[in-house]
Image: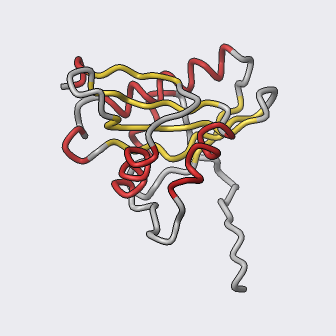
Amino acid sequence: MGDNIAIQLVHSWDEVEIANLYRAGGWWKEEYDPNELPRLIKGSFLFAVAVDIKTGQAVGMGRVISDGVSDGYIQDLVVLPEYRKTGIGTQIVSTLVKKCVEWGISWIGLIAEPDTEKFYLPFGFHPMDGHTPLIFRSDT
């Protein structure tokens, strides 16, 4: 299945397909406005879409947030459940890392979901000992 996939770096994509990918990752809330997705894509340093060549459908995605000079952060990596375990996630991460390095961005970080850390190790990612990820919550 992974052989019939093309990874494309895009500046826009169908909002419904991207919203469905966010749903597959468990990150979409129904109060979100899909009309904001084009701005999200354009505001990303890199936005990769894994496309099923036969159907033209987006089956995976990932993006990098960066200023294009120093640091980059990979986030929103997801593959539709029926396409998982076929190497698509590996293709997406490889593409994003390669493009960052080509731009001279060598500090590339991400926050892995629990029990997914091992997926990222072959790409050169390592736990950041002595660091704790934090998130802002306005309700505190």
Percent x, y of residue 68: 77, 28
Q: Quadrant of residue 101?
A: top right
Quarter of the image for the C terminus: give it.
bottom right
Residue drawn at 45 percent across, 62 percent down: 28
Above or below, 41 against 100 in this view is: below
Percent x, y of residue 38: 58, 43
Please tell me which residue lies in front, 123 or 59: 59
Please tell me which residue lies in front, 70 or 119: 70
Percent x, y of residue 9: 52, 24
Percent x, y of residue 11: 58, 29
Residue drawn at 52 percent across, 65 percent down: 32
Determine the residue located farthest toward the top in the rendered image: 102
Quarter of the image for the N terminus: give it.
top left
The number of callouts visible is 0
In the rendered view, does 92 fall on the left or right side of 82?
A: right
Above or below, 119 against 93 in this view is: below
Please tell me which residue lies in front, 47 or 94: 47
Please tell me which residue lies in front, 106 or 10: 10
